[in-house]
Image (tube, grey):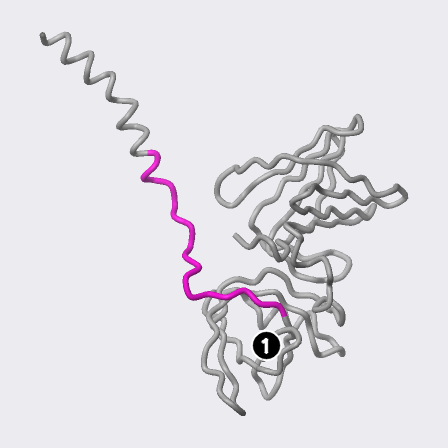
Amino acid sequence: MRAARTLMLFALLPLFTACQLFESEPAKPSTAGLTRMQGELTAVAGKLLFQPCHDQRNYVVKDTGGTSILQEAASLAGQQGALFADLRGKFSGVAAGTQGEVELQQLYRVERSTSACDDPDFKRMILRANGHKPAWALNVTAKGMVLEREGQPPLPVPYVEEQLGDGRFNLMTEANNQHIELWVAPQRCVDSASGSLQHMTAELRVNGQVQRGCAAFGGSRDD
């Protein structure tokens, strides 16, 4: 009888271990009450204002999420003054003739651009990644991904995604006799050519050759 009880205890150990591992998984930050918007950043009277694309409302930016947006905007603005920003936060307090406020929690992208608000592909885009020396770009949608490399024609291919934990993931394909992988991690990344800020780093591997760059979610994904 004692031997039988011992065997039962050992049989249950994997279940207890699995429960402990599951409970130790960090919970994803809640996005309740937060809204993602794209628009223009300008500095006015010592304040940073955000105006959503094709909208007349203005919001004073409060960096409650510690994104360092003030420093990023200052380093990018230069003589141009206005910047494009893709961000998530809690928007409140807009009435007729008044400024609202956005409590900023997540910064996806900040760049010098006068046309980003009119990007026709943004809403259907899952991910964009790019790098330099030589230049490359990878655009990902639900239908597949297109790899563009300097001196070569665009390469459209299917892909599979693997989640790696802690917000990291990779995209992989075996197509046209090529092995292509994109490894993405949630880490602040500054484009070496344009100075634009993106919220993820990227590493492109094509047949074993590695190139590094930055990445950001498009409009169809924002986890």
Residue drawn where x is 81% and y is 48% of the image: 135
- The answer to if 6 sits in the magenta stretch is no
Label total for image: 1
Query: Which element type, helix, strand or loop, lies under badge 1?
Result: strand
User: Considering depth in this image, is 99 or 206 the residue closer to the camera?
Assistant: 99
User: Considering depth in this image, is 56 or 196 the residue closer to the camera?
Assistant: 56
Query: What is the x, y in percent for residue 216?
Result: 63, 54
Q: Residue furthest bottom?
A: 97
Q: Quadrant of residue 190?
A: bottom right
Q: Of the residues shown, which amino acid type is indicated by label 1?
A: Phe
Q: Above or below — where is 112 with respect to 7?
A: below
Query: What is the x, y in percent for residue 22?
Result: 34, 36
Q: Which residue is label 1 attached to? A: 50
Q: Above or below — where is 183 with respect to 197?
A: above
**What stretch of residues is rendered in magenta?**
21-38
User: Considering depth in this image, is 81 or 86 the residue closer to the camera?
Assistant: 86
Query: What is the x, y in percent for residue 221?
Result: 58, 52
Please give left or right for residue 159 compared with residue 17 in the image: right
Residue drawn where x is 71% and y is 44% of the image: 212
Residue drawn where x is 53% and y is 38% of the image: 163
Please give left or right for residue 87 compared with residue 7 in the image: right
Query: What is the x, y in percent for residue 167?
Result: 51, 45
User: Considering depth in this image, is 170 or 32 the residue closer to the camera?
Assistant: 32
- The answer to if 31 sits in the magenta stretch is yes
Q: Residue furthest right?
A: 151
Residue drawn where x is 24% and y is 21% of the image: 12
Decide whether the magenta segment is chiefly helix, strand or loop. Answer: loop
